Amino acid sequence: MMTMVAPSRAYAVTGPVAGDEWLFADAERCDTARCATLLAQLHAMPRTGWLEIGRRELAAGGASLASAESTLGRVIDERRLGVTAWLVRDAVDTAAHHTSMDQGLLFAARRAAQRAALAHLARPWLPRDAYVALIAPFFFVAAERA
């Protein structure tokens, strides 16, 4: 069992979203396990988790994130993962659909989640600093849980 540590709770997830293996049909050598686990966690995440991700996304930004997004886009293009990336983005949108919240925060949270899912998928080819920048909104320091 894997957990995603969130600001005030941990969400237990037993594995990928059941039946979504087809998402990764063209994702040879990708880190599909991490991507699928994040997608499952997003489906299980309550509204408060989405709100926190949206707040973190709006507070983040900067040149390092823009550079990391550019690197991710280049990897997706070079590895011909465009269709898989579209399917992953759609899976994130589906997970976020059940939340009713401020549209600005929801958009920010969805964007962060899409970026993180794709970063997990493309992790084998991303430089470490780009990978970390792309998944940063999902980092929660243990001290925040105390």
Image (cartoon, rainbow, N blue to C red):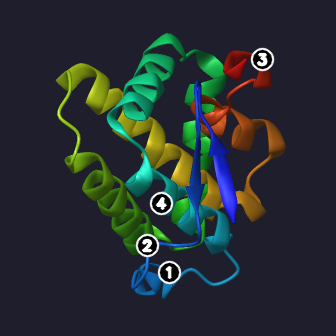
Mark whose residue sits in front, 2 or 4: 4
Which residue is identified by label 2? 84
Residue type, numbered disc 1: Phe
Question: Disc 2, disc 1: CB below 8 Å?
Answer: yes
Kind of residue at badge 2: Thr
Could you tell me which secondary element the residue under label 3 belongs to? helix
Which badge, 3 or 2, comes first in the chain's sequence?
2
Q: Quadrant location of residue 144?
A: top right
Q: Which residue is mark 4?
A: 39
Q: CA distance from mark 1 to mark 4?
A: 12 Å
Q: Earlier in the sequence, mark 2 or mark 1?
A: 1
Task: Determine the secondary structure under disc 4.
Answer: helix
Q: Nearer the viewer, mark 4 or mark 3?
A: 3
Marked residue nearer the N-terminal end (4 or 3): 4
At mark 2, the secondary structure is helix
Q: Please state, as top left, top right, bottom left or bottom right, where the C terminus lies in the image.
A: top right
**What is the C-alpha distance between the residues marked 3 and 2?**
36 Å
Q: From mark 2 to mark 4, how far is it between C-alphas?
A: 13 Å
Residue 90 location, x and y as percent?
29, 61
What kind of residue is marked 4? Leu
Tags 1 and 3 touching, CB below 8 Å:
no
Asked if the residues shown at circle 4 and circle 3 are in contact, with their CB atoms under 8 angstroms apart, the answer is: no
Q: Considering only order in the chain, which callout, 4 or 2, is on the residue closer to the N terminus?
A: 4
Which secondary structure lies at badge 1?
helix
Whichever of callouts 1 and 4 sits on the residue coming sooner in the sequence is 1
Q: Which residue is mark 3?
A: 143
> As shown in the figure, which amino acid type bears the numbered disc 3?
Ala
Query: Tag on residue 24?
Result: 1
- Viewer-nearest of labels 1 and 4? 4
